[in-house]
Every structure is written in structure tokens, then in C-alpha cells.
Image: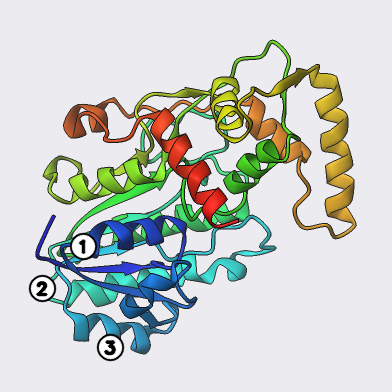
Amino acid sequence: MTGCKILITGGSGFIGTNLIDFYSKDNKVLNLDISEPRNKEHMEFWVKVNINDYHELDRAISEFSPDIVIHMAARTDLDGKSLDDYSSNIGGVQNILEITNKVDSITKVIFASSRLVCEIGYTPKDEFDYRTTTIYGESKVIGEKLVREFSDYTKKWIIVRPTSIWGPWFDVPYKTFFTTIKNKRYFHPKNISIYKHFGYVKNSVYIIDKLIDKDKFNGKSIYLSDFTALEVNSWANMISNQFHRKGIREIPLVFLTLVAVAGDCLKYLGYTNPPLTSFRLNNLLTEMIYDIKDVECEIGDLPFSLETGVVETVNWMIEND
């Protein structure tokens, strides 16, 4: 897409930063975010806005008069204690709906949700089948329902549910995975293959861009992921070979379980980011496969292979260490 005015909320975040990189070359871009851009080269596109502030958000969107809105702004950690802690995921969505609905220039809105509207490992029967186990996931369920139930909404819209997205400008938890391998502290459970639909961030940006022109998915929720599931051991070895020119080590699962329990204790004592916890180990061991065949058929081949994504990500980490 070229020659458009594209507004990205949360453009200072991980996926948002990559969206700014992608669109700013050939379009007029505005990033509305409460935080400064991760990429300092993006300062010219940034306006500090809290999406919970209706009037501030209304003024910024109305003045820019975008053609496309990509709503990425959200609180995404799992540390909140109540839905009030995730007000931007609920009230922020409501504000975006009401404001974009009255801006005539807008032709399409992409809303970002999360795979955690369903617990890890659960395969939903359809896009309306929710089974979340986190308060964050619950906030995203409410956000999706707000979009669907806005009866007078006149804009074309799509909800995207990022699975596990990784790549340049990422942060915890997937940067932690790469860093653990870089520091030679990752050990894969011995003789266990685990397949997951993860997504390299530049492929995710490519998919979002293509979805803007795809009316087939209007009014639907779809998973945002690379189309081929990766095998975690093979992926980890790719990362290790890029850092160290040698692969990772494997150890029996029982030892990893003990390390995860120790991580749980560290987190309980206030350590914010232990290398492994029971939650992370369970995430690692649980296969994560989604039905994305319709999206694959519509989008076609993705521009970045798994190998290319690993090389670019490791190089970015080395350059930004």
C-alpha cells in the first residue's frame, strides 16, 4: 500500500515499530502512543496520546484524517490483577470504535487482539469460541466483543490475533528465548518435538498490509502467524548456530521441571524475569497449531523464510546489544 495516510496506535511497541518501518517509506504515517518510539528514528511520526483519553485521541485522529487505522495499542503483560489494570484493552477499543466511526476518510480498521483469548493448546470451534485463563486474555475477549457488537459501526474491520510473534525490536518473552540461547543457557527437553504456529514479525506486517485490501475477512477474527508451523528444537538450533556456530544441548525433561520450579520461587520473591518458570515450560511443551488455511490461500507465499528471520533477528540483537 502506497500514498495513504496510515494511523498506528501503539506504534512504539514491538509490532507497531515494524509497521512504522514498513509504511513510512511510501505513506504518511502517524504513531499515537503513550511511550516514546523504541526506534529513535521514528520520533518524527510520534504523538504522545493515551488511548483512554477520549478527547485527546479524538483530536489526534480527526486532525490526521487517516485512510487506514491499525489499532495495536494495548497492555500485553500478564501481571495485571484485575480488568481495571487492562483498561486500555477495553476502554481504548471503545474509544477507537466511536472516534473512527465518525471520521469520513477512514476506509478500514485493523484491531489487534491476542491468541490468549483461548488457553494455550485449546483449538476453538470457531472465532466466537473463547476459553481464556488469564485476565489479559479476558480483556481481549471483551475487546473483540465490543468490536462485533458495535451495531452502528460503518467501517470495514478485521480483528487479528497475533500468535507468538518474534523478530527485531521484540521484548520479553521471545527476546528472552533468544537471549537465553545467546547466553548458552537454553536446554531443550530431550527427544521431544514441539510444533508451533509462531510468526516472524516482518511476515506479520506483510500479512496485515495484504489484509487491508482483502474484503474476504471483513468482520472476522483471524490468527496472525507464519503459515508453516516451526519445530522448536530446530528453531532453537538455528538461533544457536547463528550466535555460536553450534547447536543447543538437550537434557531430560525432569531437570527442566526442577529449574522451572526454582524460577517460580524466584518470581515469588520478586525477581521479575527468571529464565524459566512452570508457566513458560508449559508454554514450551504445548503444541500451538491454528487453522490459518484460508488466510494462507488468500495471501500466498510469505516474503521471509524462518532461516532469514533468524539471521535478521540475531544480527539486530548483536547490533543493539
In screen coordinates, is 22 left or right of 122?
Answer: left
Residue 173 position within the rendered picture, expressed as x and y whole percent measured from the top left: 62, 47
Residue 98 position within the rendered picture, expressed as x and y whole percent measured from the top left: 28, 74
Amino acid type at mark 2: Ser
**Mark carried by residue 209:** none
Amino acid type at mark 1: Lys
The residue to which callout 3 is attached is 59
Whichever of callouts 1 and 2 sits on the residue coming sooner in the sequence is 1
Q: Note whether 231 is above or below 224 in the view shown.
A: above
Q: Is residue 166 visible?
A: no
Residue 18 vs residue 70, the one in the foreground: 18
What is the C-alpha distance between the residues marked 3 and 2? 15 Å
Residue pictured at 82% horizontal, 36% vertical: 260
Determine whether label 1 and label 2 are within 8 Å by CB: no
Which scheme is used to colour this image of the protein? rainbow
The residue to which callout 1 is attached is 25
Q: Note whether 91 is above or below 158 in the view shown.
A: below
What is the C-alpha distance between the residues marked 1 and 3? 25 Å
Whichever of callouts 1 and 3 sits on the residue coming sooner in the sequence is 1
